[in-house]
Image (cartoon, grey):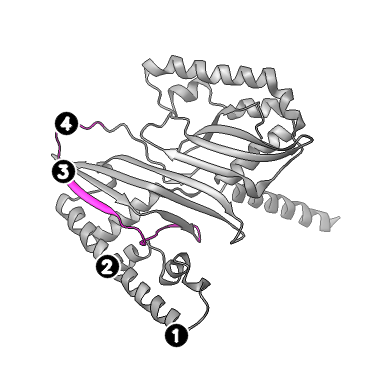
Amino acid sequence: MNTIYYIIPLLIFLLSCTSASSQKRVPAPAGIIDSLLIATQNDDFELFRRQYLSDREVTEVGGYFNLPPSKDRDERIKAFVKKHQAKVAKRFGQLKTVVKKYKLTVKDMIANSFKYESYYQTGFKRRKQGTRNVNFKFVKGATLVHLQLSPMLLRGGQWKINPVWDFKLYTDELDKQYKKSDYFVRTFPQEPLAYAQQIYQKIKNKDLEGLMKAYPTNADLKGALGYSKDNYRGAVKFVEENKRNLERNFDKLFVVDSLILNKTYILWNKRKFLYEPNFGIRLYVHTKGGIKKLYLRGIITDQRIFLVDISTVLNN
């Protein structure tokens, strides 16, 4: 009997750990700006360098390890790495000059945008998470500062800049009043692939009630999602129509047999406004009629991912 008293608390503890880890927040691409600003403000080149792919990582991305071992390959790798290191040092100097001149902080940022993609690389047998078109805009006094980063890759739980491509940094005198109407998400409230699996599981389990709870409420649209008075009515109508469509056609999804997880494709085209439903998931599912595509759309905030639409038409 005493053994049971020890086992039960242990099981509760393990279950709580599992639940907590399943909701663990993961870094979102825009969060890298914190480290870049801190590094340049404090003359910390080592911190700045760690925001880039390491010498080995950039060599791997460049495809040099795919070449057969030879003296020529080693020389090419050596020259490539040297060029990479020089580029990182140059970018540190450029960004440090601008950050210190205008005393830039995250509070001065008025806009950030990027395209986030997550898909499985069959050749490497791993999921790739990367970005394109990463932009940050700051306003300080009468000056606009625009920073455009090279594409980034998620490696070891950290976003890293790939210096194979260049980044752009320029300043300009303001010719108009810029309004801060952007939103900044440092971390995903939930790992995107895990979220996709969670929604799929509700579909598979025919859990219509659970899916309805995944949509934003009217209070969410007014509060967390920050819809203006002008856009609020349209937003409510959009969400209600999509929920009614799901209720009417939910049985069309009963043909779903299983999820082909590795084929799941995720795109977050993060733009200016918080309430844009620009988070998309393409699921590939087995049905009796063959492999079909199931599309989901959502909105990401720093607190939660909101579902706004499920396509009830399965595509080939």
Disc 4 marks a residue whose amino acid type is Lys
**Residue closer to the observer: 158 or 303:** 158
Asked if 92 appears above or below 214 in the picture, the reply is: below
Disc 3 marks a residue whose amino acid type is Asp
Disc 3 and disc 2: Cα gap in Å?
A: 24 Å
Q: Is residue 140 left or right of residue 243?
A: left
Disc 2 marks a residue whose amino acid type is Ala
The residue pinned by badge 4 equals: 176
**Residue closer to the observer: 65 or 224:** 65
Disc 2 and disc 1: Cα gap in Å?
A: 27 Å
Q: Which mark is residue 89?
A: 2
Asked if the residue under mark 4 is in contact with the one under mark 2, i.e. CB atoms within 8 Å, the reply is: no
The count of marks equals 4
Label 1 Cα neighbours within 10 Å, binned few <14 / some 14-19 / many ≥20: few
Q: Which mark is residue 172?
A: 3
- Mark 4 vs mark 1: which is more N-terminal? 1
| Secondary structure at numbered mark 4 | loop
Q: Which mark is residue 71?
A: 1
Asked if the residue under mark 1 is in contact with the one under mark 4, i.e. CB atoms within 8 Å, the reply is: no
Asked if the residue under mark 2 is in contact with the one under mark 3, i.e. CB atoms within 8 Å, the reply is: no
What residue range appears in magenta?
Answer: 156-179
